[in-house]
Image (tube, helix red, strand yellow):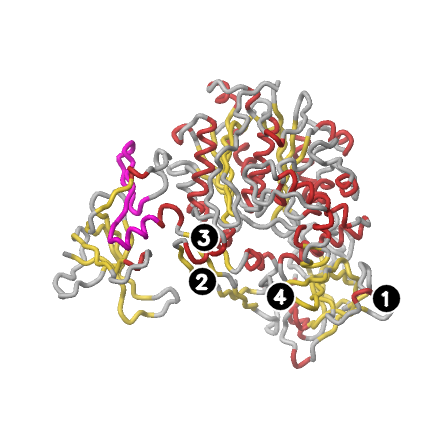
Amino acid sequence: MKNSLKQNYLENLRGTKLNSKEFYNEVLSVKTIPKFNYSWATGVAIGKFLNGLKEGKILASICSGCESKQVPPMLFCHECFKPMVKMEKISDQGRINTYSLAYINTDATRREKPEIPIVIDFDETINTRDGEPSGILHKLDENSDLSKIKIGSRVKAVWKNENDRIGDITDILYFELMEEN
Amino acid sequence: MKKNRVGMVSVGMTKFNRRAKETAKELCYYSSKMALDNAGLTRKDIDGVIVGSAPDAFDGVHQKHEYLTDGSGGMNLPSTRGYVGGGTGVFSPIQGWYQIASGMFDTILVTTEEKMSTVQPSAQAAFLTIFDNLIERPLGPNLIWIFALEMQRYMKKHNIPKEHIASVSVKNKLNAIDHPANMLGRKHTLEEVLEAEIMADPVRLLDVSPVADGSVSFVMMSEKKIKENGISYDDVAWVDGVGWNVDTTLWNNRDLYYPKYVEKAAKQAYHMAGLKDDEINPTSLRKWLDFAEPYDPFNYKELHHLEGLQLFEKGGAPKAAFEGITARDGDFPVTPSGGLLGVGNPIAAAAGMKTAELFFQLTGSAGKRQVELNENPRGLAQAWGDLMQVGTVLIMKGGRVE
Amino acid sequence: MLQNESNDNDRKEVKGDFPVSFHYTAGIAIEKVWNGFVDKKLLATKCNDCNYVYFPGKLFCEICFEEFSEEDWLNLSNQGILMTYTEVNYDMEGKKLDTPIVMGLIKVDNSDTYFLHRLIKSENGKNNNFKIGSIVKLEWNDDRKGSLDDIKGFIVI
């Protein structure tokens, strides 16, 4: 292919490399620690959902246009764009959609014992897309038998004591593997 | 579309560094000046600019678009920002394309940039906000979780051995040795990748591309202007197809083993390039395209995206990678640049680098990285972003165009 | 409709923060300028083609997009004209300040750009009337490390 461009097009690329010591201690810099504090409105649907968690219930929203039975609940259906009309309690059991064994924390420090994030497909739900179950991100009991965790394993919510529940996703302490696995 | 054909006539880029001394503005200047110089143009010759930079939180500056006006050459010019997370690096040239194809502009300077070193203690902390603020953040999640959860689902769905996925890290980091901007080009063995430090199973350290500071720019031009300026058609990479798509934020409603948003963006691009539905299948596409640069922030993502792009059957990409089909000298080269895994990951500029690779390959100026091209050479770049949601696709062709 | 079933028991808000801090390198040009402060210099860059002087000095001219070389750097005098100013009475969190701070945009002599910094009262108390058009002079801090705070502020002369 005939072409008149330089063969070594990417010569002399610029950008001054700094090692960690130079970056943090030697070159001139400005450090700021901003205060970013937020208070987010929960909205209609999640407000009710969180109240439901306080009462030890998982609430799904029912769509007026299709058969969606959605957790987390929404004000409107993402697929048919019609309003959701009511909320219904569903079973707090489901199956593991996917999982991981996390050996690092958010601040990048290491953990001896892994945290076990999971995505759960709740039994009595139908998501807004394709008729499959819908669900949430949560965690599996840290003391679970790691060898028994599989995609499809049945799990059940373990709740905090009624007095300790405040209307937060952490009102569910974690999910645990059920005996029948 | 044949009426308002748009070409990419030059590229500029900085080295990718884990930490650069230059400010974001200065990095942008390096790459956009280089793109202008390589096109034989000055700032007076451009009609508008595009600034592509992902979350403000990485550079630590709000209104990053306005902040980068000087370095992107945009002073007193029409300037637009594109921002779709990691998808930005391919979305920005798409914006350059439609601004020129509309007939409103002839010459646009596109700059993609990120300075990841600014945010402390690490980019991880900024990624915390990717999770739902109401019902996910109280669980204390981190970004690696999402990728680990997706990788797990993908592997278990198709019974993929880790070796097949690990081979992508080996391939890309090896390819990157020949990329002048690279910060991670190195020869690794498969064992090194398989035994690297565990992060969140199944993700290990060498499965992940580290963040970087960097900038990549392009000059894009209308065919009319290219003719006026006497630029040889062989020195141009022509835009052939574009596509972009976003999926629901209800990521836990989706079966993560397959990226539907990539499929939809890809089909949009293939249709624009003139392909019919029965021509959009792996066998036909791998003849029609000469190579691909899918987004590879993790090794499994390259494979995941290849399947979304319809370049391999669902579950078929890993084995092909392991068998060398996607090596630079293989049947269908994938990520000849070395990708994010090998060159580095300054979010928006990362896919900018992949788009730039289309230019180098199609104009025959990729040096040691050059892949074999057919008579009507075509390449595809794809980027991904946000909460496993965004697919952006760009198809370019080289040589004579009708 | 879900909206019509509002209940006072529903949790109304979730609080959270964004636990990041930022470490900005001064970069090539500003590092030069701040090092200049240590030597009591105000370093600017002049573009001869555009006839435009930037203070603080930059890596490149924003207008013609050419990069500045060593010869394009110059040292400005320590005084200028007050172009505009404002008296700030509240801090960033909305708390009233005990003593208001006055911020000004100063056109340092021979620069084409304006420089943001504090306006301060001169020690002998004379002439602390800040007015647009006032001639102002820079006061340095004795302890200079290479930062904006090396400058105490500008006084009216």
Judge if badges 4 and 2 mark residues of a common chain.
Answer: no
Residue A91 horizontal/vertical position (percent): 78, 68
- For disc 1, the marked residue is A181
**Disc 1 and disc 3: Cα gap in Å?**
50 Å
Label number found at residue A34: 2
Residue appearing at x 76%, y 53% in the figure: B153
Disc 3 residue type (three-letter): His
Label 1 and label 2: CA atoms lie apart by: 48 Å
The chain identifier of the residue carrying mark 2 reads A
**Nearest to the observer: residue B37 or residue B261:** B37
Q: Position of residue B320 (x, y in %)?
A: 77, 39
Q: Amino acid at mark 2?
A: Pro
Residue B98, placed above or below residue B116: above
Disc 3 or 4, which lies upstream in sequence? 3
Q: Is residue B321 left or right of residue C52?
A: right
Tell me the element at label 1: loop
Badge 3: how crowded within 10 Å, few (<14), some, or many (20+)?
few
Q: Which residue is mark 4?
A: B140
Query: Residue C2 location, x and y as percent?
Result: 65, 63
Which residue bears the numbered disc 3? B62
